[in-house]
Amino acid sequence: MRRYIPIIFVLVIVIVVPVSFIKKEKTSKEELGKLLFFDPILSQDHTISCASCHKPEYAFADTSAVSKGVTRKKGSRNTPSAMNVSLLSSFFWDGRAADLEQQSLAPIENVSEMNLPLQQALYRLKNNKNYYRLFQEAFADEPTAKNLAAAIAAFERTLETSDSPFDNWKFSDDPNAVTDGVKRGFALFSGKGKCTSCHFGSNFTNNEFRNIGLFNARNLKDSGRSLISGKNEDVGRFKTPGLRNVAITAPYMHNGIFKTLKQVIDFYNDPGKVVPNAINRDSLLAKPLGLTTQEKKDIEVFLHSLTDKRFHEVSKRK
Amino acid sequence: MLYSALMIFYAFAGENQLIGRWESKPSEKGNVTGVVFKDSTFEGYVNKKPFVSGVYKMEKDTFSFVDNGCEGKRGVYKIIFFSELDSLRFEPILDSCDGRRAGMSRLVLGRKK
């Protein structure tokens, strides 16, 4: 046994000593934000996290018309995708948050969502040894509202997608990346369909609020932007959503009224036929578009081409 | 001297100096805007995400175009090349699309090699 002692000693020196010098990288704001995003610690009864409604496999959107919060309480609007948000200038369907930091705290306190007063959320994080350490690493500070918002927002800013067939066609200049149907659909989207009047930009939204005719003060009572601005002209207006990955974020519209893209395109083709008594519908939609069946199909395949490659398996199931 | 000679040569030779990929430097928020010019078409993008497609004509230093935004309104700009034709900016001559005019007026692009 004695003869092995020097060998063991050398092994200890060679293996253990270097390991003790490996310095662990400090946790970044984005990594901390990701942990928080997926952790039910921020909901009243520890049952749901941000990711419960912003499901990663569906481009961080939900598959229900409206999501259920703690105690299975239903929300009032459809959960939008949390992806491709870094260039947005307002958040929520009514635009009540001006930046991602403001947006990130609201669902925590919302009684229909996570229903946890912010002070309680911070109390939990401060008394959680792991989170206390991670906040120190990321911010050199204890958990505060500002740090919590900054961490979640930083994570959300990483959720950008730019590797769809459409991107490969237009950015990488590969004409074979998409079918002829996609090319025709894009031409219709930009022309006869008038879609780019609102869905213009790198994420296919011009960040405006529009009334597309889903408010009639009867069965469609959500008046949208006007609840925030107090302006009459904003009655029935909602933020124009981006369209990246739209093929996997059904159902659609602020209330999740349409289950398929086909229904959405049929609606835009003749909104008055679907909701005849809408109030203040935007003049852009005053006349039916007159799209043929083939044209509608082409627009639909174009919208499918906006799906990032990471979601292609989900997309095939749709 | 060489720069001036080049400018005169290209202006009269009629060679389209726009063709190729051009990009801005990252903005304060890190956003990079770029444009790929072909013979008569172009594709604009932000952070590798395409956002505008259009057709254009170049006559001497005047760039006129129509894109898929701005409801088909034509924009006319003077293109000012600098840094030995490796950078450019746009000076509006005629564009009734306010958002586009504001965006293009502050855009400075460098040629991507």
Image: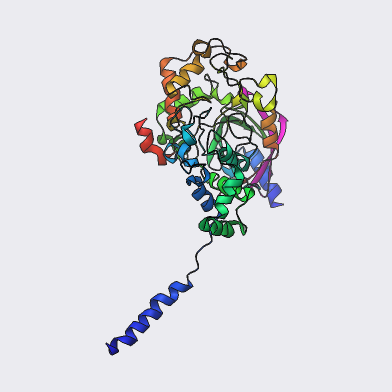
Query: What residue do we see at 51% from left, 57% from top?
Result: A130
Residue B41 placement, left or right of A15:
right
Give whichever of A250, A196 is nearer the camera.
A250
Give the answer, above or below, for where B107 lies relative to A124: above
Residue B74 located within the stretch drawn in magenta: yes
Residue A92: percent from the left, percent from the top? 58, 33
In the picture as drawn, the residue positioned furthest to the left comes out as: A1
Query: What residue do we see at 50% from left, 41% from top?
Result: A50
Q: Quadrant of residue B40?
A: top right
Query: What residue do we see at 51% from left, 29% from top?
Result: A78
State whether the magenta stretch is mostly helix, strand or loop: strand
Residue A33 located within the stretch drawn in magenta: no
Give whichever of A53, A205 is nearer the camera.
A53
Q: Quadrant of residue B78?
A: top right
Q: How is the image coloured?
A: rainbow
Residue A170: percent from the left, percent from the top? 49, 36
Give the answer, above or below, for where A211 lies relative to A276: below
Query: What residue do we see at 53% from left, 45% from top?
Result: A42
Quarter that holds the N terminus of chain A: bottom left
Residue A234 placement, left or right of A48:
right
Quarter that holds the C terminus of chain A: top left
Residue A65 visible? The answer is: yes
Residue A146: percent from the left, percent from the top? 64, 48
Q: Which residues are magenta?
A: B70-95
Residue A274: percent from the left, percent from the top? 49, 13
Residue A61 visible? The answer is: no
